[in-house]
Image (cartoon, grey):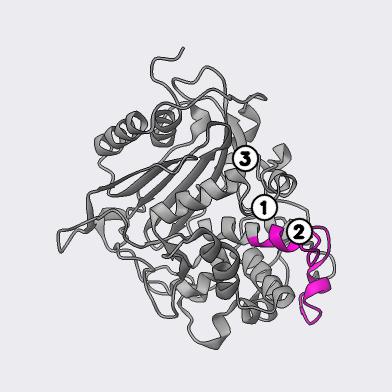
């Protein structure tokens, strides 16, 4: 659902420069104030957190969480992480790779012998991570009167990752494995099922054991079946209408995690620090493929020119867009800084950083660069 922003780098990824900056970021207080000014000028409604490796976090809430009730956003409230969940899933996969339980170039059938899909013996874990599997797409299921694909309205036992992997996602493939990039939630639902099989734990329990507890991310958990939002904010669509309800739990390992903005940037900090993965595993995780628009594993990784930075800045980006909630999670590893942006308006156009203009470009320039730099 609404993944056009997820794949924009695919069409224009080749414009990124080859180098990346390693200069220091501006002081956090300065950067936070500049980010807030950009957000306020754009009339964003949501929450933005900017974090440094030293532990400091700038956290600002703006606008209304519920327009009809005039209820404001508050810093520290729960948000739907949407497809940032895929970033978490990719980290969990790499942890299992480190443990020797998963190989990136082994097939689905290696871990799910009962996988009924005709390409189960050919589609690899890496292809699932990079959306080149060719599996059927939940977004193609018949829509309801509000335009929501039926897949995302289902409830009950059939919506778990394992059930999806043995059900809808094992249907007739749309393309040959490796043929082309095609954004698809089935890829990560199948990954969720693989993780459950090799670990012997549910996806939620694995998130808790391997990420939430070690990092003390007390807010991080899966949305429960039947929850239409996953967070406290109401999502809005075109014309200021409330976004049609979806069952967030149907997104599973592809998009059903919820938590605070502060916990998200804390996760970013741990990834940069090497608290969750070895440097070698993180390098694989964040190795952008120019042929796929700099898609890495669960994220996009690329250098971009920003206002105020003398050289291109290496960025690791993950986006999400579910139920009227948009998310941007961007790490600048060389600068030791990250920014997490949550808004409850599906109509806001962030633009693309590579264009050298637009909202994302302005926000990232404010967060990562000195305004006085050449």
In reply to whether residue 111 is colored magenta, the answer given is yes
| Disc 1 versus disc 3: nearer the observer | 1
* Horizontal arrangement in the rendering, residue 165 relative to residue 247 (left or right): right
What residue sits 26% from the left and 61% below the top?
Answer: 241
User: Can residue 83 be seen in the rendering of this structure?
Assistant: no
Residue 98 badge? 2
Whether 161 is drawn above or below 232: the answer is below
Q: What SS does tag 1 mark?
A: loop
- Which circle's residue, 1 or 2, is located before the other in the chain? 2
Whether 28 is drawn above or below 45: the answer is above
What residue sits 70% from the left and 44% below the top?
Answer: 279
Q: Nearer the viewer, residue 45 or 216?
A: 216
Q: Position of residue 93 (x, y in %)?
A: 69, 61
- Which circle's residue, 1 or 3, is located before the other in the chain? 1
Residue 132 picture quarter: bottom right
Mark 1 to mark 2: distance in Å? 8 Å
According to the image, label 3 marks what residue? 301
Q: What SS does tag 2 mark?
A: helix
Residues packed near mark 2 inside 10 Å, few (<14), some (14 to 19) or many (20 plus): some
- Which circle's residue, 2 or 3, is located before the other in the chain? 2
Q: Position of residue 85 (x, y in %)?
A: 53, 60
* Horizontal arrangement in the rendering, residue 344 relative to residue 200 (left or right): left
Q: Are marks 1 and 2 in contact (CB under 8 Å)?
A: yes
What residue sits 45% from the left and 59% below the top?
Answer: 81
Seen as rendered, the residue at the extreme bottom is: 157
According to the image, label 1 marks what residue? 277
Residues packed near mark 3 inside 10 Å, few (<14), some (14 to 19) or many (20 plus): many
- In magenta, the rendered stretch is 92-117
Residues packed near mark 1 inside 10 Å, few (<14), some (14 to 19) or many (20 plus): some
Whether 224 is drawn above or below 217: the answer is below
């Amino acid at each position: 659902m609404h993944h056009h922003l997820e794949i924009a780098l695919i069409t224009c990824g080749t414009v990124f420069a080859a180098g990346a900056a390693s200069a220091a970021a501006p002081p956090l207080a300065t950067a936070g104030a500049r980010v807030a000014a950009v957000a306020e000028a754009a009339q964003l409604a949501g929450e933005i957190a900017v974090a440094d490796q030293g532990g400091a976090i700038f956290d600002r809430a703006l606008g209304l969480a519920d327009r009809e009730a005039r209820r404001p956003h508050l810093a520290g409230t729960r948000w739907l992480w949407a497809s940032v969940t895929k970033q978490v899933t990719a980290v969990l996969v790499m942890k299992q790779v480190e443990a020797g339980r998963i190989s990136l170039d082994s097939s689905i059938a290696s871990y799910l012998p009962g996988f009924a899909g005709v390409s189960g013996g050919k589609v690899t874990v890496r292809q699932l991570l990079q959306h080149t599997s060719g599996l059927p797409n939940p977004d193609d299921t018949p829509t309801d009167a509000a335009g929501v694909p039926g897949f995302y309205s289902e409830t009950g036992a059939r919506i778990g990752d394992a059930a999806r992997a043995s059900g809808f996602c094992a249907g007739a493939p749309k393309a040959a494995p490796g043929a082309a990039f095609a954004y698809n939630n089935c890829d990560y639902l199948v990954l969720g099922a693989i993780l459950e099989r090799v670990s012997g734990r549910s996806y939620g329990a694995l998130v808790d054991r391997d990420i939430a507890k070690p990092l003390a991310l007390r807010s991080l958990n899966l949305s429960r079946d039947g929850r239409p939002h996953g967070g406290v904010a109401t999502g809005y669509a075109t014309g200021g209408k409330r976004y049609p309800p979806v069952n967030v739990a149907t997104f599973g390992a592809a998009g059903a995690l919820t938590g605070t903005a502060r916990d998200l940037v804390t996760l970013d900090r741990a990834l940069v620090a090497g608290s969750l993965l070895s440097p070698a595993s993180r390098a694989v995780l964040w190795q952008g493929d120019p042929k796929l628009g700099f898609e890495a594993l669960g994220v996009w990784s690329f250098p971009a020119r920003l206002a105020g930075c003398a050289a291109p800045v290496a960025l690791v980006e993950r986006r999400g867009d579910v139920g009227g909630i948009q998310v941007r999670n961007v790490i600048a590893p060389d600068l030791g800084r990250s920014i997490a942006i949550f808004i409850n308006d599906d109509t806001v156009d962030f633009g693309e950083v590579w264009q050298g203009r637009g909202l994302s470009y302005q926000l990232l320039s404010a967060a990562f660069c000195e305004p006085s730099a050449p």
